[in-house]
Amino acid sequence: MTAITLRIPDAMDKQLRDAAAGAASLNDYILRAVRRQMTLDAARKLAALAPLDLAGEGDAL
């Protein structure tokens, strides 16, 4: 497991808390957002290394 320290500017606090209102906690909301972004970043890097021909497969990146 890798530890990540995330510093959120005070100016974003209210908007972030409002966006996370439906989540179990603010930490859970942020964690899911970071995981999603890390997955997208990794997928983009992989796609750039070895482009796959997925025509007709229904997969999109």
Image (tube, grey):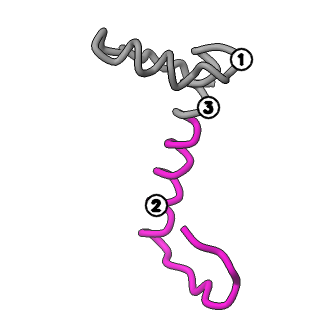
Q: Residue furthest top?
A: 10
- How packed is label 3: few (under 14 Cα within 10 Å), some, or many (20 or more)? few
**Separation (CA) of disc 3 from disc 1:** 11 Å
Residue found 53% across the figure and 18% down from its top: 3
Amino acid bearing label 2: Arg
- The magenta region covers 35-61
Give the residue pinned by disc 3: 32
Q: Quadrant of the N terminus?
A: top right
Dot placed on the residue nearer the N-terminal end, 3 or 2: 3
Dot placed on the residue nearer the N-terminal end, 3 or 1: 1
Amino acid bearing label 3: Arg
Given this view, does label 3 or label 1 mark the residue nearer the observer? 1
Q: Which mark is residue 52?
A: none
For label 1, the SS is loop
For label 3, the SS is helix
Quarter residue 35 falls in: top right
Give the residue pinned by disc 2: 44
Give the residue pinned by disc 1: 24
**Separation (CA) of disc 3 from disc 2:** 18 Å
Q: Is residue 38 left or right of residue 6?
A: right
Amino acid bearing label 1: Ala
Q: Which residue is at the front of the view, 6 or 4? A: 6
**Separation (CA) of disc 1 from disc 2:** 29 Å
